[in-house]
Amino acid sequence: MMFILSEDFMIKDIYERIWELARPYLKTRKNDIHTEISTDFAQQLLAQEGGEEDIVIPAIILHDVGWKKVPEDVQLKAFGPNASMPEWNRVHEVEGARIAGDILRKVNYPEDKILEIQEIIKGHDSRKEAISLNDSVVKDADKVWRYSQIAVQINEKRFGLTVEQGIERLRRNLEPWFLTASGKRMAAEEIEKRAKEAMGNRP
């Protein structure tokens, strides 16, 4: 079975199928929530920065499926400000690229696009420089999520941070984390919302 990527209704059906196949792998580390929000940010970034939707959307849906191969008692040691076992973060990238290839071949995605998506996933955390605009959009969508309301709440508990410490960490990383002007702007807008929410919650 083949499909034509230029026909919107067909490609959206394919994205839904990719989501269905990815869901079992996203049931860890709150990756289902993370992926849904990151996908929304990816759509916004595509509209503002450009890039190829048929690369970016599958890549952002599948970028964290590899965490399912990392033991849950190790996951919190593999990422974040207190990571003591960062080598496991690399495992999730490599395993994620492999799983993504399996899922995309099940939906008969074009092989050249599969290879590009796998390459993006394989370095979405560890590779600091982008290899393409598509890669930049995926990386930034992944990180803008950290500035969302739910991510701030989750990460405060994960990392043992106060609200103020969490917001300061996000402010400090606006420059080093983001590759596109739109991604940085979106993150800055989100952080101002979080700061206002924090002020509003004070007694």
Image: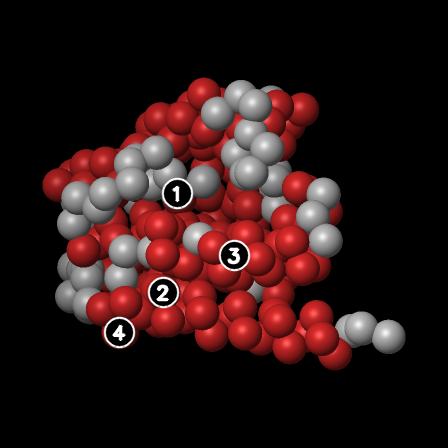
**Residue plotted at (28% across, 56% down):** 179
Can residue 140 be seen here? The reply is no
Q: Amino acid at mark 1?
A: His
Q: Which one is closest to the eye, mark 3 or mark 4?
A: 3
**Residue occupied by mark 4:** 48
Query: Which residue, given by chain and number where applicable, does mark 3 sit on?
Result: 170
The residue that mark 1 highlights is 63
Q: In this view of the protein, which residue sits in the foreground, 199 or 31?
A: 199
Mark 2 belongs to which amino acid? Lys
Q: Earlier in the sequence, mark 1 or mark 3?
A: 1
Are the residues at dot 1 and dot 3 in contact (C-beta closer than 8 Å)?
no
Query: Measuring 46% from the left and 37% from the top, which residue is drawn there?
Result: 65
Numbered disc in front, either 2 or 4: 2
Nearer-N-terminus badge (2/4): 4
Sequence-earlier tag: 1 or 2 = 1
For numbered disc 2, what is the local secondary structure?
A: helix
Residue 184 marker? 2
Assess disc 4: are there few (<14), some (14-19) or many (≥20) residues with their C-alpha within 10 Å of its C-alpha.
some
